[in-house]
Amino acid sequence: MTPGRIIFLNGTSSSGKSSIARELLDILDDGVFFHLSVDDFNSMRTRRELAPREFDAALRRTRLGFHRSVAAMAEVGNDLVVDHVLSEPWRLADCLTVLRPEDVLFVGVHCPRAELERRERARGDREPGLAAQQYDLVHRHGDYDLECDTGTASPHECAERIKAFLPHRPSPTAFSRLRVRYSAEG
C-alpha cells in the first residue's frame, strides 16, 4: 500500500492554517484529502476544569495521540492536510519520529504579529496574546519546504501555491533534513 501524502501546515494560532486547509480541500484534485487539525483533537477533550498539572499532562497526551493518528491515516494511504502549532520543540521532534519524512510537505504559515493580534481579537475564541506567545517559537527550527504569508496573500492564494508546489517536493524534504539534524543533536 502506498502511504499518503501529508501537507503539514505549521504556524501560530490565528495565522490562517485552517483557512488554507479548507481551501486546499476545495482545490486539490489528485486524490482524496482529509483535514486533520490539532484544534479538533483538543475540542474532543472533556470540558470539566482540570488542575494545571492534569491539564498539561492531558495536553501532551493529546498532541502525542494526534501525531500518531496522522501517521496511521497516512500509513494506510490517506492524503492529509495537517494543521498544527509546533510551539514546543518536543512536538516537532515527535512528528519527525512518527511521520515518514519523505511523505511530508512542510509548510510554514506566517503572518505579521499585528495582524495576528487583530485576528485574535476578532475571533474572540482564543486566549488573548496566545499568538504573540507562540510567535517566536513555532518557526524556531528554521527549515521548510515552502512558506506562505497570510498577511500578504489570501488563504486561497496560499493554497494555490501549495497545490502548484506539491508535485515538485524537494528531495530531501525539510522533514528529512530536520530528522537528521535532530538525531545529531539528540
Image (spheres, rainbow, N blue to C red):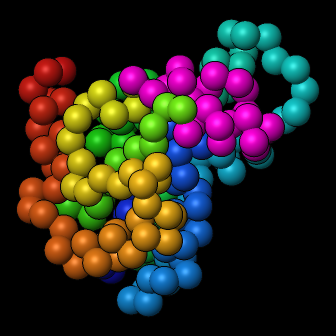
Is residue 43 visible in this depiction of the protein? yes
**Residue sitting farthest toward the bottom:** 29
182 left or right, relative to 139: left
* In this view, 39 is above or below 161: above
Relative to 137, is 96 above or below?
A: below
Q: In percent of the image, x 75 and y 42: which residue is there? A: 122
Q: Which residues are magenta?
A: 115-136
Place of residue 33 in the rendered image (x, y in percent of width and height, measured from the top left):
50, 76
Q: Quadrant of residue 29?
A: bottom left
Does residue 128 show up magenta in the picture? yes
Q: Nearer the viewer, residue 157 or 101?
A: 157
Q: Residue at x 18, y 21 (%)?
A: 186
Q: Can you give x and y, in whole percent of width and height, for residue 172 in the image?
A: 9, 57
Give the camera-side residue of 37 and 97: 37
Give the side of residue 13 with respect to residue 153, left or right. right
- Is residue 64 in view from this perspective? no
Residue 118: give x, y in percent of width and height.
65, 37
